[in-house]
Amino acid sequence: MDFDESSTKLIPPEFLAVVLAGFGNEQVLLPLTGNYGDEPSPKALLPIANKPMLEYPLIWIEQSGIRGTPYSETSFTTPYTSDASSAFPTLRIDLQTYDESQGLSVGTCTILRHYAHRIQRDFVLLPCDFVPAPSFSLTQVLNKFRTESTYDGAIATACFFEGRRPDKSSSTDEWGALPTPIPIVWDERTGTLLHIETPDDIDRNGEEMELRMSLLTRYPRARLSATLHDSHVYVFRRQVLDALQQKSRFDSLREEFVPWLCKPQYQRSKQEKYGRVLSPSTNTLTQGIALRHSTLHSKSPGHHDTEEDFLRSPPSDGQNEEHSRSVNPLLIDGEDDDEALDSLRVGLVVLRANTEYAARANNLHGYLELNRHFLSQTVYSLPTDPESRSLIDHKAQISSDSMIGHSTKVEERTSIKKSIIGKHCVIGKMVRITGCVVHDHCVIADGAKLDGCILGKGTKVGEKAELTRCVTQCGYEVSAGENTRNEKLDVSDWAAAPESSEENEDEEGSEEDSE
Amino acid sequence: MVPPPLLDVQSQSSNGDALHPPPRSQKQMTKAERRELQERQRAAKAAKATTAAPNGVNGKHAGIKPGSSAAMSNAPSPRRASRASDAPTRPSSLSVSRPTRDSRVPQTPHPAPSSDKARGLRIFAHFGLPKPVSVAKGEIHPTIVRLALQFSNFKITGANARCIATLIAFKQVIQDYTTPPNNTLSRHLMTHLSPQISHLVAARPMSVTMGNAIRQLKLEISGSDIDLPEQDAKDALCHKIDHYIRDRIIIADQVIRDTAVSKIKDGDVILTYARSSVVEKVLLGAHEEGRCFSVIVVDSRPMLEGKKLLSILASAGIQCTYLLLPALGSIINEVSTVLIGAHSIHSNGAVFSRAGSALVAMMAKQHSVPVVVCCETYKFSEGVQLDSFTKNELAPIGSMFSSDRHARSQDASAFQNQPNLEVLNPLYDLTPPSCITAVVTEVGVIPPNSMSSIPLALGRF
């Protein structure tokens, strides 16, 4: 007799979470994501504060109660996934790999199209590199989506956050230009995302921003902002995938598809063309009859009789925006199914900077900033594990705002300030490390000086080398006495020289697009 | 006169016996000194009481005004306020920042609260504000989760709308339900539905219509045939739900509409309050029939539902006037009939409706204007309700009603950050049967006194 009558069987799961864990834009995060010998070093596993980056979105998903199956789209297999499944027992993690073929860079849209048949319900799309503010819960975005998709047929909800101004001295331009946030237009009162500038728009007309009149007619109090970053967290309705299939030439979700998705809500031509796809009449979650009887809901004439627009009293305070959706007037008997053309809105949740810090680690600056942010949250104390304790010399000076992984050996008279050191590192004597992020298994010989560097896994730094604001690939060897500033050091000469360098270029396919 | 006794006495008792300075100092004091000490203590106590008293008096006045039921006299309300102040529970989330109440409160002869921050919410302290809905993981059907969000954000409001929305959501839940092994649908489905219902109630207190509908649904479930295959039983239940909606709401509304339309004559001036789905149907129906009449829509904050009704009626071509509740007195002389809707109707004939309708009914009665309540029979509640204090609901403050665009973002923050300000928005009030002329239901036009007899028998089919 099976007593385990899990009630979850009676409840269909509501959302599916899809995590994109690709490589990101290769120019930006290389050489960190370059190969480590033959093994790839994926962006998703780069550690932030000594926890793999992928863990943050997974924890976030778990807290919001989604039990679904997050997909990780990667092109490799890692030992992490087995850890992940055990670390998150309530999530059923399903790893899907998408093999890139011959160096074609693959956009996120392509991947979604590929897996569309496996996604059967409303889904949340997350990047692997978004670290949310601790007070910001995914449930907020989900609730907004839930409310709006039932109330007036919204099709998606996005989340934008206000970025913190970066510290000028901490990063240099050699690492790549800081991404400028893209201007967006949104309506604050209803939380609707209206317009996102795409690179195509900027190419076409770099000086002006073109907005449709229908947008402004519907939302006269829209706001324009160029300080908000896209968190790449989207909640979509299932029908959006059908629309995606129709737009086969779109490659990037963030840059092309989502801006396009904002258009049908006010642009009539697109609405007519895609309205049926985006909100098919078989959608059974409608509460049309109830909404007709609801006292705070008012009808608006359907979109077909716009010639009577001038007869309709304009929404005087704009208060009707939210409540007046196209629902048939009350007198028509309740038997006809409402050809409610849904509003096809795209909702928006804006996370303000003064609440908490959220960021994406999709470029080197962001990565460093996030690490620094986590440093400021913790206070270092010597490890309690006796074995690790013994490895750290008592004469080493470790400041309280650093983090050191376990089994790391630190020898005497080394000073470590404001840095994150990974596991199993060996740090020699008289080393000065300031403001660095050192990954696991690094070996830093005596007398080295590191300032503001990011060292990939297994980097070896020779004696008395000085590195300032450098980024090294995994397994790179810095020779002794080398003095490098502001450079990205990647291994160009491995043992298997020519093939591996070609492989490096081939593996640089990006699965997640850049800014 | 006499040197300050206490301290000197204590310093004089220097023989180290620090355990009993107070009694010894009392004995050592002269009678005058003791009296001075007593006076000082009494003055201190009175000072504490007076700082609370002005606030208490203000609280009494502030508490009485929102009690909008016209039948309330002032005498019972202070007593009621003090009774409410004795209520031990403070479920409101706003009470977290308030200091704990003194235990002296029940003993004070006049209802002066001792904690100065508590005065605003005391009168409805026993039902506080709705808490934010927390998602219970995994046990609540997603449709119910969404519906609860709609309720708590006031997207679906109105007795009919909420009932229909609940029933449709339950249809979805029933369709997705599978009977676990070793169980029958008729027994297990009810236990499956219970957490969903409590989730909805947590979002917003249940309306009488929802309660009646759910009771009927449970009756149907328990009566479902054991031998039916599961999908058939589920389909049968969904059909019954559909029939309930159709018969007791949609068709009932049509019958009411036809009955009420026959009461509207050409040249009438109809007054209605806020927005009722039934009254809206009646007015639109009368207009379709070609009657020539005009409508006065009376509205009140914070929900301002009358504006929506106004836009619908005006776009249908009916002559409308719009005013707020305080201006009612100036136009009541022109009104020929008052039509109001109801949230529920009780067996003593009292009508529970949107806050402010009792005022409208009372005013109309004073000016001999007939007050007609349009109400379906499924809104009948068998209890007897005498006032709107024991059972009511407070609307949360916030921009969710989006009434005034200038104040919308300032409203919430302005009202919530004031330490000396509490905002009360009761949503319902009770119209006593003496103010009502007739109730139009689908079983006929009934005087309010005989509410208990007829619909009770007919409502149980």
Image (tube, helix red, strand yellow):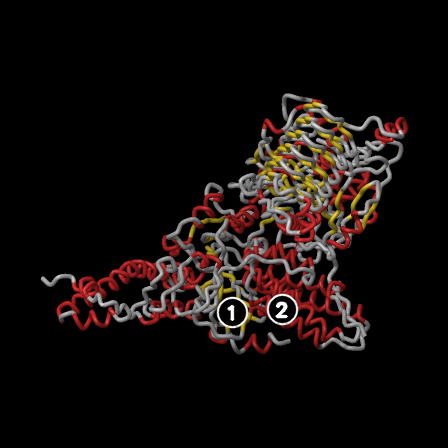
Q: Quadrant of residue A479?
A: top right
Q: Nearer the viewer, residue A201 or B333?
A: A201
Q: Nearer the viewer, residue A226 or A337?
A: A226
Among numbered discs 2 and 1, the one appearing first in the sequence: 2
Figure check: A413 above or below B199: above
A77 with respect to B8 (left or right): right
Q: Which residue is located at x 74 percent, y 63 percent?
A: A8
What residue does disc 2 label? B213
Residue A416 at x, y = what percent? Answer: 62, 36
Chain letter belonging to callout 1: B
Residue B417 at x, y = what percent? Answer: 43, 48
Please tell me how crowded label 2 is: few (under 14), some (14-19), or many (20+) other residues with Cα within 10 Å: many
Figure check: B56 above or below A422: below
Q: Quadrant of residue A460?
A: top right
- Image quadrant containing the N terminus of chain B: bottom left
What residue does disc 1 label? B345
Q: Nearer the viewer, residue A490 or A467?
A: A467
Type of the residue with mark 2: Ala
Q: Disc 2 on helix, strand or loop?
A: helix
A399 with respect to B171 (left or right): left
Q: Which residue is located at x 54 percent, y 44 percent?
A: A319
